Image: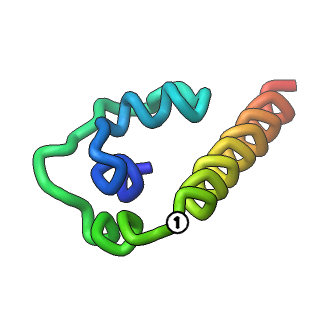
């Protein structure tokens, strides 16, 4: 997300909200991240796929946290 947000010219917090994910730490977009330029050249469909993968990872992490609490 830190790499994708600057490429889309939005804050990381906004991208997390769009992706339906809760921010885990304050966003820091004072400087571009190393992969921002590369990500900015991706087609929209690839960026959507990155967001989908982030959602899947968040879901998996949530499931693991819930399993660990039992």
Q: Is residue 19 left or right of residue 57?
A: left
Q: Nearer the viewer, residue 39 or 61?
A: 39
As displayed, is residue 43 above or below residue 51?
below
| Residue 45 image point, x, y percent | 62, 59
Q: Is residue 31 left or right of residue 7?
A: left
Q: Which residue is mark 1?
A: 43
| Residue 14 image point, x, y percent | 39, 29
User: Which colouring convention does the figure follow?
Assistant: rainbow
Q: Residue at x 53, y 29 (%)?
A: 18
Q: Residue at x 61, y 51 (%)?
A: 48
- How crowded pointer 1 is (Cα within 10 Å; few <14, some 14-19, many 20+) is rated as few
As displayed, is residue 41 above or below residue 7?
below
Specify the quadrant of the image occupied by residue 63. top right
Q: Residue at x 68, y 54 (%)?
A: 53
Q: Is residue 60 left or right of residue 29?
A: right
Specify the quadrant of the image occupied by residue 28. top left
- The C terminus appears in which quarter of the rendering? top right
Numbered disc 1: secondary structure: loop
Label count reads 1
| Residue 34 image point, x, y percent | 26, 70
Q: Residue at x 28, y 51 (%)?
A: 6
């Amino acid at each position: 997300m830190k790499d994708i947000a600057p490429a889309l010219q939005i804050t990381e917090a906004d991208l997390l909200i769009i992706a339906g994910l809760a921010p885990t730490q304050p966003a820091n977009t004072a400087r571009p991240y190393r992969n921002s330029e590369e990500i900015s050249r991706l087609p929209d469909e690839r960026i959507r796929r990155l967001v989908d993968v982030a959602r899947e990872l968040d879901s998996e992490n949530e499931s693991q946290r819930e399993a660990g609490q039992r």
